[in-house]
Amino acid sequence: RDATRALAWLKQLPPGAPEWAAVRRIASDAREQGVARWVLRGHAGHVLDVEFAPDDRHLISAGDDGTIRIWDLATGAGRVLSTPGPITELLLTPDGARAVAIGPWDPDSSDGRAMRVWDLAAGTARELPGDPNRVDAAILSPDGRVVAAMTCGGGVSLIDLATLARRPLLPAAPRAKANHACASAMAFSPDGRLLAVEGGARDRSRVSDGTS
């Protein structure tokens, strides 16, 4: 039994109810399992990603209902930001001020996966530029200023979140050499100066300058 629901049921039990004989056992089980501080409800569909804010006072969630929800962990209250479509991934900047919301792969879209950067305090969003070869994966630089976006063919671009300028870093492989699987991986070095790129249509790992 869910420990949090069990305790909620106990709180509604009237004094003298015959179920009180089982209360001690239920309370003991709940204590051993641990009890949630809040059950955060609001999403109309599946929750697909969650991120703790750097202040440890907020949780940001996103899902296939097309909303981003900013939860106050002291009160359980949530603030809603609505987007045009589902969100499968959130990239939160280190200062917690902005979040990059990434949509699912869309075969009918010229961009592949839609990406928007949100100002969480203002509740406003700007759409990030796509890539002619369709974006398949993205990561955020350690300082939160740049998004590295990779296409299925292994092409990589850097997008400045302040100016929304996109700079190609690695070209995509020709379609004839593309793999059927778009498995890709990227990682910034801790100082953000280097970007490691693995997979895609290249079948090898590469390390590039991630700042210039």
Image (cartoon, helix red, strand yellow):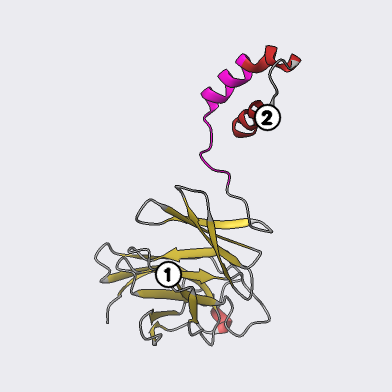
Q: Is residue 69 visible?
A: yes
Q: Give the secondary structure at mark 1.
A: loop
Numbered label attached to residue 12: 2
As drawn, the residue found furthest toward the top would be 21
Q: Where is residue 89 shown, x and y percent of the image? A: 53, 64
The prevailing secondary structure element of the residues shown in magenta is helix
Residue found at x 35% / y 56%: 54
First in residue order: circle 2 vs circle 1: 2
Of residues 174 and 68, which is closer to you in this image?
68
Q: What residue range appears in magenta?
A: 24-39
Structural crowding at the residue carrying mark 2, measured as other residues with C-alpha within 10 Å and reported as few (<14), some (14–19) or many (≥20): few
Residue found at x 42% / y 69%: 121
Q: Nearer the viewer, mark 2 or mark 1?
A: 2
- Identify whether 187 is placed above or below 209: above
Residue found at x 48% / y 81%: 126
Q: Where is residue 3 shown, x and y percent of the image? A: 60, 30
The question of residue 31 being in magenta is answered with yes
> How many numbered marks, from 0 up?
2
Q: Is residue 200 left or right of residue 160?
A: right
Q: Amino acid at mark 2?
A: Gln
Cα distance between the residues tagged 2 and 1 = 38 Å
Q: Where is residue 159 shown, x and y percent of the image? A: 40, 81
Q: Is residue 16 left or right of residue 177?
A: right
Numbered label attached to residue 121: 1
Instruction: For the N terminus, give its image quadrant.
Output: top right
Q: Amino acid at mark 1?
A: Ala
The question of residue 103 being in magenta is answered with no
Of residues 77 and 168, which is closer to you in this image?
77
